[in-house]
Amino acid sequence: MEETSTDLAIYNGSDIVVQHNKLIDAPRYFSLQEQKFFLLLLSKIDPNNNDQNLSFRVDAKNFATLLGLEYTNNVYRDLKSITKRFLSRVLEIQEDDTILQTHVVRSIYYRTSKGYLDVKISDEIIPYLIGLKSNFTQYKISQAIKLSSRHAIRIYELLKKQETIGERTLFLDDLKKKLGISSNQYKRYSDLQKDVLEISKREINSKTDLVIDYQTLKDNKKIIGIKFIITSKKYMEDFINQSEKEDVTTHKLHIQQIQSIIDYGFSEKTALSMTKNLTAKEIQDALNAVMKQIKKGNVKNIKAMLRTSFKERWNTSTYVRVKTKRCDQNNKKISNKNCDLDTQKTSQKLFGFLSKILNKKAS
């Protein structure tokens, strides 16, 4: 392999990772360090490049720093251990009725005296990385590389693919497969939730450009899938900036309010649409009104009540007035119904009385 490969520059957080969606959805049994090595390689590939011979030069010191390793005399031993495992990993990419099994990297040359290693990407995976015109996902490596959970990185990728839609539903078996979780792991949902879903949610929400939440899908009482709610922080902030000129405190409150609505299961776009013409105070009043009724146990359909609360601009006393009005209307209907029954009974008695008189005269 020639030593004139493209230099892999010091990672600066500005490089873009681009992958075909079939590669995004392919199961990945990578460790955290292997996952980061994979992203590092992808971030240096120009998706518009038509060169089918993808080779890269990786600075050993930068590589070690990215993986959290100290650059000592043992660093090459540690790096070789990581890349050796990475070379053994097999990706399975679904193509209609065909499954492609391939490695990401074909070869790695360690130039220890010069402080770098040369990496050659496998030919079979190149079509999923370059010349992509559609059906691909891209994001900045800086968003994913700082995540400290391998599952968080994968969930981020899977949800980034559906960012514009605002949600993604995955059956549990499919989700585990995409995350590289074996069938004998996390057999109890509570363990999966605690060790995978909640950790990933916290990391993604605090460290990336997405805010996510999730709901369980059930078949009777059995949990069979997860519905993820996906929100772009930038889209949310841009929308609010355009819709209202607010001071910093109100602006932050408005963002928190939108997230509160999303937490109830709405998509980002729906939440923004429902509150488009409302002030921060009106949104908060409506939220407080619904929360008050939830605490009282008066809510059967939270999403329906939230929609109504924003539409009618509720506050904490609105629901009482609405309920009283409905009661008055119901009482009026009941009263009218009772009057009709009384009239009917009176008519029956009168008809019976007249019948008796007519019968006597006839006899």
Image (spheres, rainbow, N blue to C red):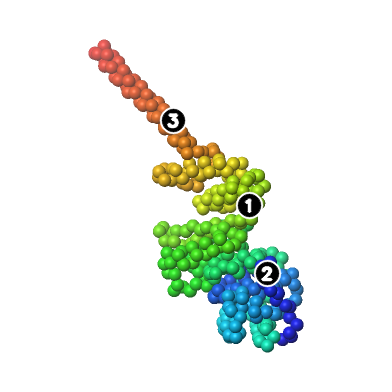
Which corner quadrant of the image does residue 338 belong to? top left
Q: Secondary structure at mark 2?
A: loop
Label 3: few (<14), some or many (≥20) within 10 Å?
few
Q: Is residue 213 visible?
A: yes
The C terminus is located in which quarter? Answer: top left
Q: In the rendered image, which residue does mark 2 sit on?
A: 12
Q: What amino acid is at disc 1?
A: Glu
Label 1: few (<14), some or many (≥20) within 10 Å?
some
Q: CA distance from mark 2 to mark 1?
A: 25 Å
Q: Secondary structure at mark 1?
A: helix
Q: CA distance from mark 1 to mark 3?
A: 43 Å
- Are the residues tagged 2 and 1 within 8 Å (C-beta)? no
The N terminus is located in which quarter? Answer: bottom right
Q: Residue at x 58, y 50 (%)?
A: 252
Q: CA distance from mark 2 to mark 3?
A: 66 Å
Q: Position of residue 293 (x, y in %)?
A: 44, 43
Q: In the rendered image, which residue does mark 1 sit on?
A: 237
Q: Residue at x 74, y 69 (%)?
A: 48
Q: Is residue 318 above or below residue 47?
A: above
Q: In the rendered image, which residue does mark 3 sit on?
A: 329
Q: Position of residue 147 (x, y in %)?
A: 57, 68
Residue found at the very far top of the displayed protein: 361
Circle nearer the N terminus (2, 3): 2
In the displayed structure, does residue 17 sit left or right of residue 85?
right
Q: Position of residue 169 (x, y in %)?
A: 53, 60
Q: What amino acid is at disc 3?
A: Gln
Q: Is residue 92 visible?
A: no
Q: Nearer the viewer, mark 2 or mark 3?
A: 2
